[in-house]
Image (cartoon, helix red, strand yellow):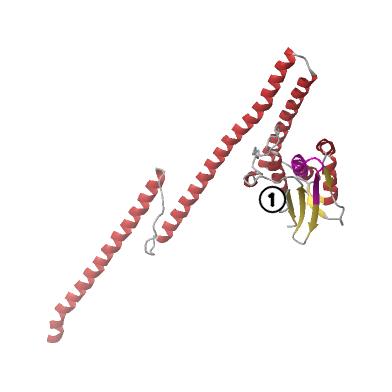
Amino acid sequence: MSEKAILALPALAAGMLAGFLACGFLYFLWRRKRRRRIEELTAYLEEVNIGGGGILLQGDEDDLSKLQDEIYKTVTELYRTREMALEAKNNFAENLYNIAHQIKTPITSASLSLQMLQESPSPIYTEQIRRQLLRLTHLEESLLLLSRLDAGALSLERKETDVFTLLELSAEHLEELCREAEVSVEIPEAEEMIIQADMEWTMEAVMNLLKNCMEHTPRGGVVRCAYEQNPIYTQITITDTGSGFAREDIPYLFERFYRGKDAKKDGIGIGLALSKAIIERQNGTLTARNLPQGGACFEIRFYRH
């Protein structure tokens, strides 16, 4: 080995040592950073476990980034599921309260009528008791129908259904109410329009809408039905000549047990919710709005696909 090479050995050794030390230092920094990331993830999960949480800050891209993303996605989904469970629990409690209130009202009224009947026999009190019993029966039937819809246990046979026939039969079932309210129903006979729907249950939905319009139309007023079809959907509109919906009621019209500002005294607040549920089960939508010239409007759309 030449003298020059021998003289270069210390410098080479020093360079190798410096490189080794640099690699060791970089490895030390990497391990420390990795340990810190793991500690951050561990602390985040511990906070989540005691009901805390929050946002997991995104660090530099490394081999733990994918794990961090998966942890955050999982925790976010758990929070969402928890919120849904709490909402369902609150809704259940609220529904129980509403049901209890709806049952209590006719029972209290019937009890008072019975007391009056004992003190002074009169057909007036007998009729009041009969009406409250009918109200309870209607409430029971509506609640059972809602529970079957919620559970997906209501069998709907979607068949070819003519829209004009659907509206005509629905209105015929309400002829007595029409006479009492002195309200007329107009249904124009247009060219045949077919939808895929369960005739019986869709009639139930339409009857609830017609009844709502009749109850809010002044004597001598008119409830009008119209329908049209395009390649995407068939639309049915039901309008009245009343004062329309109270603006503050519109967002809640289809909520169960909601009774608006001008709700009928003995109403139970389920009819519109039932109509919406039945129509939506058949690939349809139901909305409500006020007409520019006055009056309420229900709009049904049955989509082809």
Q: Residue furthest top?
A: 119
Residue 218 among magenta residues: yes
Give the side of residue 7 with respect to residue 39, left or right: left
Residue 162 among magenta residues: no
Quadrant where the C terminus sits is bottom right
Residue at the image position 74 percent from the left and 26 percent from the top: 133
- Dividing the picture into quarters, in which one does residue 109 lie? top right
**Residue topped by disc 1:** 289
Label 1 crowd bin: few (<14), some (14–19), many (20+), radius 10 Å: some
Quadrant where the N terminus sits is bottom left
Place of residue 132 in the rendered image (x, y in percent of width and height, measured from the top left): 73, 26
Give the side of residue 219 with respect to residue 84, left or right: right
Place of residue 140 in the rendered image (x, y in percent of width and height, measured from the top left): 70, 31
Place of residue 40 in the rendered image (x, y in percent of width and height, measured from the top left): 35, 54
Q: Please state which of residues 104 and 37 is positioned toward the viewer in this rendering.
A: 104
Q: Please state which of residues 13 and 291 is positioned toward the viewer in this rendering.
A: 291
Q: Which SS class for mark 1?
A: strand
Q: Please state which of residues 114 and 153 is positioned toward the viewer in this rendering.
A: 114
Relative to 51, say whether 108 is above or below.
above
- Callout 1 amino acid: Arg
- Dividing the picture into quarters, in which one does residue 135 lie? top right
- Magenta residues (range): 204-225
- Dividing the picture into quarters, in which one does residue 103 lie? top right
Q: Is residue 162 visible?
A: no
Residue at the image position 44 percent from the left and 58 percent from the top: 69
Relative to 156, say whether 100 is above or below.
above
Residue at the image position 47 percent from the left and 54 percent from the top: 73
